[in-house]
Amino acid sequence: MDKGSLLIRGGTVITATGRSEADVLMRNGLIEAVGPDIGDGFGAVDRIIDATGHWVMPGGIDTHTHLAHPIGRLGVMTADDFYTGTVAGAFGGVTTIVDFGLQEQGGTLDAAREHRLGVIDPDAVIDFGFHLIVTDVNEEVLAEMGDLIRSGFPSFKVYMTYGDKKIGDDDLILLLEMAGEHGGLIYAHCENDCAVTHLIERHLAEGKTGPAYHATSRPPAVEAEATNRAIMLAELAGAPICIAHVTSSGAAQHVADARARGVTVVAETCPQYLVLDSSVYDLGAGCEVAKFVCSPPMREQSHVAALWEALADGSIQQVSSDHAPFRFEGQKTGGCDNFTQIPNGLPGIETRLPIVFTEGVVSGRLTPERFVELTATAPARIFGLTSKGRIEPGADADVIVVDPEREVDITASVLHSDVDYSPYEGMTLNGFPTWTISRGEVIVDEGALTAKRGRGQLVDRAPIDPVTFL
Ligand code: DUC
Ligand code: ZN
Ligand code: ZN
């Protein structure tokens, strides 16, 4: 079937490896040609976009989103469904997400896969995959993993804390061994559960119950210890591992040290840890602080600086959003008097690219090429999205066209998530796309949504290659 053609003319094409003044021709959902002055030789096109003065980059890939998902120990449902969440993503330049499918206690991973597909497919406006969250490890689950990996579901999320979603070290070793054997990847939320539980109990016993105490109940050592343990277990098992949301210099150093000694470990951080710090947990700010409750929490400035260094020097390989949106009124406010009752997470799918663009590229910390690598090319490589994250002939035509000079003042009302606040209110951000293009179709057209609900497709993902994914 002819799915049409589109020529993006006159922009600066930026990829992870370089930049050039070039046109990009897309046909039938794929990139057909990239080069200067593409014209008559390729025949007529359905539409031409004049990208003069714009940067043409691979669409963002966000491999850490929680849409319509019961989060953490409390199991509160996130506020975005797969329509509002992916619409927000499209406006923020995201053309693919990798979300999560949760294994029920006593259930199989295959049942989790089937169920989740049924939830996502009718609603998503951009392409999608999902990691399977393993919460209950047994013989049957271990036996399923090989087939799942070979059928396009190569990554498995584990929580080292979070109530009944937590798995212990004994199970983590088994999962790592099985993943390593079959080309899978374990993706780990690393916090020491015993320490978190102990510190929460101590805070409550001392009457430290307000939202600001969330942060002191999960200090950096809690994260660094679990990160090191997960890496060491992966090393023992000879398996690759991806560390979710690194927030602290200690955890980042464990990743860097392990990579230097040849361990197949990669890591992500998230925008909130790059532009916010522990000052958001001001004891005097009352319940407003609940807006910033996420796990791990934001850290002091020395950690923020260490994360930027790790992004620039390559010891952290990607930036995902960990989009876990909760409304302030009615969801976050449920824990104004007891921080353990605040659902953990921040909205961020729409602001991820603009934050990294503004604070990374515009501020001179990252090259434009590194921006593309961190937000699209590396996530595709790490999580097996072989058709995405590149602008080259044969790749999926997932492209954003950005006017690097255009600024947007952030308020909740200019964003598209189904939440009543943004953690970034008051910031001015560059890097929002003028056009977002998914498989050759313009889905955001100069501020207007042109995508149909449910047009997004499941992405076939390849097994992990532990050599190239580094
Ligand atoms: N941390 C959060 O704050 N929210 C989503 C899940 C997580 O690990
Ligand atoms: Zn997590
Ligand atoms: Zn998460």
Image (spheres, helix red, strand yellow):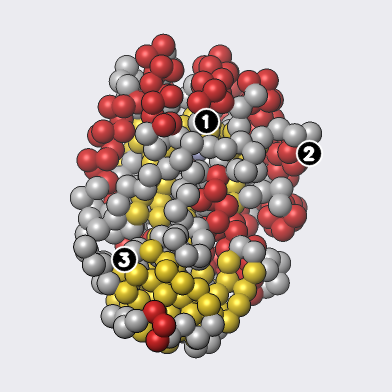
> Front-most of 153 and 302?
153
Q: Quadrant of the N terminus?
A: bottom left
* In contact (CB < 8 Å): disc 3 and disc 2: no
**Could you give the CA–CA distance between mark 3 and mark 2, rounded to whole angstroms?**
43 Å
> Which of disc 2 and disc 3 is earlier in sequence?
3
Amino acid type at circle 2 is Ala
Residue 72 is situated, as x and y percent measured from the top left of the image, at: 42, 34
**Residue 461 marker:** none
Badge nearest the viewer, 3 or 2? 3
Residues 462 and 289: in front is 462
Mark 3 vs ligand 3: CB under 8 Å?
A: no
Q: Which mark is residue 28?
A: 3
Image: 454 above or below 246: below
- Where disc 2 sits, the SS reads helix
Give the foreground label among 1 and 3: 3
Instruction: Give percent across and percent down for residue 178.
Output: 51, 21
Question: Is the residue marked by circle 1 packed among few (<14), some (14-19), or many (20+) residues within 10 Å?
Answer: many
Report the residue at 32% width, 17% height from top: 106
SS at mark 1?
Answer: loop
Question: Which residue is drawn at the image coordinates 54% and 23% (left, top)?
Answer: 181
**Residue 162 point in image, percent of width and height:** 47, 29
